[in-house]
Amino acid sequence: MSPRAENTASKGYESQGVPSSIGGHVALGNERNALPEGRVLWRGRLDYVTAWREQQDLAERRRAGAIPDTLLLLEHPPTITLGRSAKPEHILQSVEALEREGFAVVATDRGGDVTYHGPGQLVGYPILDLNAWPHRPDLHAYLRDLESVLIRALAHFGVAGDRFRAHTGVWTGTATPAPEKIAAIGVKASRWITQHGFALNVAPDLSHFERIIPCGIHDYGVTSLARVLNRPVALAEVAPIVANAFGEIFRLDCHWQDAPPSPPVED
């Protein structure tokens, strides 16, 4: 990477402090002080269009060097999105019927086909400058790195996530006759500033996927972390693990700028 690109990554924005209640960095290790700053923003449950607008605003600010690399973490209300290569026949109900059931339907500018977002699904939107150190301007490598983040996070829970053939995303049971998708990925990069990202099925209502052909893949189903573990799993349990894996894979010294979700209180 050229010195100019490295300089862009390390200067031009004000460092964001960490609230004292959070307790510091996401990514730990001996090389932490050598890594560029990143930040993690927890947005809770946010409608898709509002989150999309925030991504666009953050992307412009990242391009201008006003902010460091940023990861938005959140969940959406029930939403079906269509990527740039989406086929209408992959939505199995009319838009009117879906809206009557409480689903938003949004055509978006990410890559990929049709997908579902909803409560219990951890969505991550990285706003990265792939031209800046320590990244590289390679979209295929970026997709593989996103998969690595999720594979590493799943391993924390004892779940073997893997890549599967030519299908972008993360899968379980790839050595069995019936692999299932546990995380979808669809991205956009404009002048190497990334938007959109990944959706990890933590504990969503899997029946909601029956209204579409997820990612246009007819032959395989979807699953969730809760289903694989056969126990309840809260987003608050998973979000810090994903954020930590994100910092490790993308070599960022990440801070929670907004407080991470609070784990549920056990009775």
Image (cartoon, helix red, strand yellow):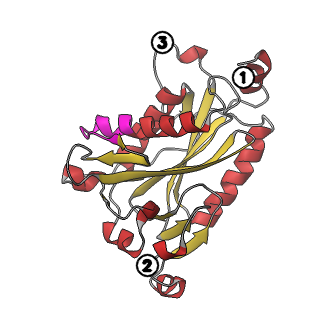
Could you tell me the amino acid type at mark 1?
Ser
Give the distance between the C-alpha atoms of the residues marked 2 and 3, in whole angstroms.
51 Å
Residue in view at x 71 percent, y 30 percent: 131
Quarter-wise, where is residue 152 in the image?
Answer: top left
Identify residue for label 1.
Answer: 10
Counting the numbered discs, the total is 3
Front-lying residue, 172 or 26: 172
> What residue is drawn where x is 78% and y is 34%?
65
Q: Quadrant of the C terminus?
A: bottom left
Q: Name the amino acid, label 3.
A: Asn
Instruction: Pinpoint residue 3: horizontal percent, then vertical percent.
Output: 77, 15
Q: Position of residue 70 (x, y in %)?
A: 62, 39
Q: Secondary structure at mark 1?
A: helix
> What secondary structure is marked by label 3?
loop
Q: Is residue 230 above or below residue 39?
A: below
Image quarter (top left, top right, bottom left or bottom right) of the N terminus: top right
Q: Is residue 158 visible?
A: yes
Q: Position of residue 251 (x, y in %)?
A: 54, 24
In the rendered structure, which segment of residues is drawn in magenta?
Answer: 151-162
